[in-house]
Image: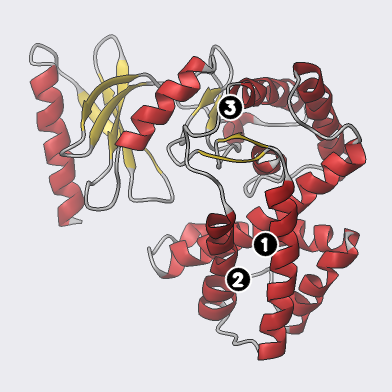
Amino acid sequence: MAIELERLRLIKLWLKDQFPEKSFGIEPASSDASFRRYFRAIFNDDSLIVMDAPPSHEDCRPFVRIAQIFNEAGVNLPRVLSQDFERGFLLLSDLGKTTYFDVLNEGNADALYRDAVDALIKIQLASRPGLLPDYDEALLRRELDLFPEWYLGRHLGRSITQDDANLLESVFQKILKNNLSQPRVFVHRDYHSRNLMVSDPNPGILDFQDAVYGPITYDLASLFRDAYISWEEEKVLDWVIRYWEKARGAGLPVHDDFADFYRDFEWMGAQRQIKVAGIFARLHHRDGKEKYLDDIPLVLSYLKKTCTRYRELSPLLKLVDKIEVRTTF
């Protein structure tokens, strides 16, 4: 707490240096799953966002670099107005307070997701190798390994036998083979309802600093297998078809057969769901962020449904059932 108060004091001094003639108030804007925090500086005629990224834990430079890359794609991001890498502060334009998660409902979902898909396609069309880190096998694998370490081991307190470990490894290898065979594009890596803002132009896009160059279905799986909000399968299928049609029309490297594309979408979703269950458990046990436990049941429900649809993934479902993975906490 003392460290957080000291960081807030430094933020206020930094803002006073930049706006010596203006008075302002400051309030929390949001926090995320990292050590970053966001504050809203409120002036008489405007508001701005301060990113607080303690240099001992975070680096602001990727945010600035990727903001430039994605801005060139023509999507709506916070503008970087000032930066202090040494102290870990960025001053950003304010995209407002309304996320997709705040307002999504049956009446507006088609329109909001249409805008999100259009923005995603713009990002993907701008893709070029060599600009962003590769979403390679090592990174995808480290993410998968979070599940046995943090969810099964730390959270549920369950050890698995060598046979179970071999089974898990076999399934992970199949998932990785699919993921790595997909065409590669720019990947936001957390493209979901809490990182999309209702704005003009719509959507405003946040939390893109961990972007990579990787599988084309990853962000689509983040969007429509959202860890925080769910939809009927028929709706998701329709939205994915609409993306696929637009992507093909735009010349993106998606499968000509939608069934093949949808399989990639589901297998990519499985990788993300395995990873997210591990991350959410780690956020609770390592970082004291208990709220993420409430979202694990939905994540696991996606994973289980996918495992029932593909024979190659069914051993994972059997393993989950065998070690009694619960979806209530």
Q: Amino acid at mark 2?
A: Phe
Front disc: 3 or 2: 3
Along the line of sight, which residue is nearer the eye, 134 or 324? 134
Q: Earlier in the sequence, mark 3 or mark 1?
A: 3
**Residue 246 seen anywhere in this rendered image of the structure:** yes
Within 10 Å of the Cα at label 1, are there few (<14), some (14-19), or many (20+) other Cα atoms? some
Spatial separation of the CA atoms under disc 3 and disc 1: 34 Å
Front disc: 3 or 1: 3
Along the line of sight, which residue is nearer the eye, 313 or 129? 129
Relative height, residue 227 to residue 23 (above, below):
below
Q: Which mark is residue 127?
A: 3
Q: Disc 1 marks which residue?
A: 297
Within 10 Å of the Cα at label 3, are there few (<14), some (14-19), or many (20+) other Cα atoms? many
- Identify the element where label 3 is drawn: loop
Residue 119, how many percent across, how many down?
62, 21
- Going by the image, does 57 lie left or right of 19? right
Residue 52, how many percent across, how many down?
26, 39
Name, please, the residue furthest toward the front: 130
Q: Residue at x 16, y 38 (%)?
A: 86
Tag 3 and tag 2, C-beta contact below 8 Å: no
Q: Which mark is residue 329?
A: 2
Spatial separation of the CA atoms under disc 2 and disc 1: 9 Å
Q: Quadrant of residue 122?
A: top right
Along the line of sight, which residue is nearer the eye, 305 or 121? 121
Q: Amino acid at mark 3?
A: Ser
Q: Quadrant of residue 75?
A: top right
Q: Quadrant of the C terminus?
A: bottom right
